[in-house]
Image (cartoon, grey):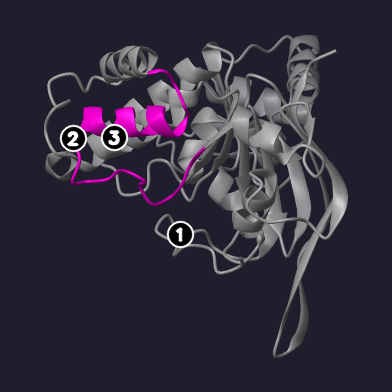
Amino acid sequence: MTNLAIQAEGLRKSYRDKTGEKVVLDGIDLTVPEATIFSLLGPNGAGKTTTVQILSTLIRADAGQVQVAGYDLNQRPDDVRGAIGVTGQYSAVDKLLTGEENLLLMADLKHLPRKEGRRKAAELLERFDLVEAARKPASTYSGGMQRRLDLAMTLVGDPRLIFLDEPSTGLDPRSRRAMWGIVRELVADGVTIFLTTQYLEEADELADHIALLDHGQLIAEGTADDLKRLIPGGHVSLRFTDDDTLKGALTALGQGFIDPSDDDRLTLQVPSDGGVASLRDLLTRLDAAGIEPADLSVHTPDLDDVFLTLTGQPHHDEQKQETAR
């Protein structure tokens, strides 16, 4: 059985304001296997930040059973803190200190012996390609370098589980992809990543499992491909060498339409969820009719389509920080 980094059942949290009680989390369940990337998505105010704050021991839930890194969240919060790392949306880097000094400060806060702290700092500077800038003030670092330093500081204590809150916000595409590479390396080393992000491309690229949170409830879960199959719009494109073969395929399948973007009018689009079973059925029916396409491609909606369909809200890559606490 796969070991779990996080297991939460019936997680609830509400606040009171002038209008009365506001339910932020309404009994959600989460299961995150070790050494995987789990991404929590949702519109502003959905409860993402509240979820991370609870799981990282910053606030207490009103109800629910939670284990993080194998420890009961309520009974052993100190053990949970010792096993996790948190890299927030806003950098924890002290810009008046050098990169090396920031790492040594974290080593002191983790109560590492001085020799061990220096060894760890040197190792992380090397790993995150910061050796040349190690003794320069962090204020002189680019956004990508500061983000790498921020994550390196999180790793000083060798956490088994890291909460990454929008790790690539504000980074240029090259720096963002460099950050993705670092995240993948961490997971390959056995670290679990709990990711919140405003970039749906990031979740699509990185996450092993995605959960969509809306109004305090999980409304969909699965891989990126699983979620894309939940909504209409998917299809299989079949290209043929001549018009007669295309018409034969249309007769054999009983559905589909000619792709209007194909000037040769030799491409047939057939509605499909893109799943293995439906694709196998389509090919079996073509084979039974003695028809073989020259080319085949599967098209599914992207995560933006999923987000819009399931939440009723368009997704914006530059959303403001979530307003729900």
Report, in whole angstroms, how far the alpha carbon at label 3 lies from the one at label 2. 6 Å
Per the rendering, the mark at residue 102 is 3
Disc 2 versus disc 1: nearer the observer = 2
Up-down relation of residue 312 to residue 274 (above or below): below
Amino acid at dot 1? His
Q: Residue at x 55, y 69 (%)?
A: 323
Amino acid at dot 3? Asn
Per the rendering, the mark at residue 98 is 2
Amino acid at dot 2? Thr
Report, in whole angstroms, how far the alpha carbon at label 3 lies from the one at label 1. 33 Å
Q: Secondary structure at mark 2?
A: loop
Quadrant in the rendering for residue 288: top right
Which of disc 1 and disc 2 is earlier in sequence? 2
Q: Residue at x 75, y 61 (%)?
A: 216
> In the image, which residues are magenta?
86-113
Report, in whole angstroms, how far the alpha carbon at label 2 lies from the one at label 1. 35 Å
Q: Are marks 3 and 2 in contact (CB under 8 Å)?
A: yes
Q: Nearer the viewer, residue 99 or 274?
A: 99
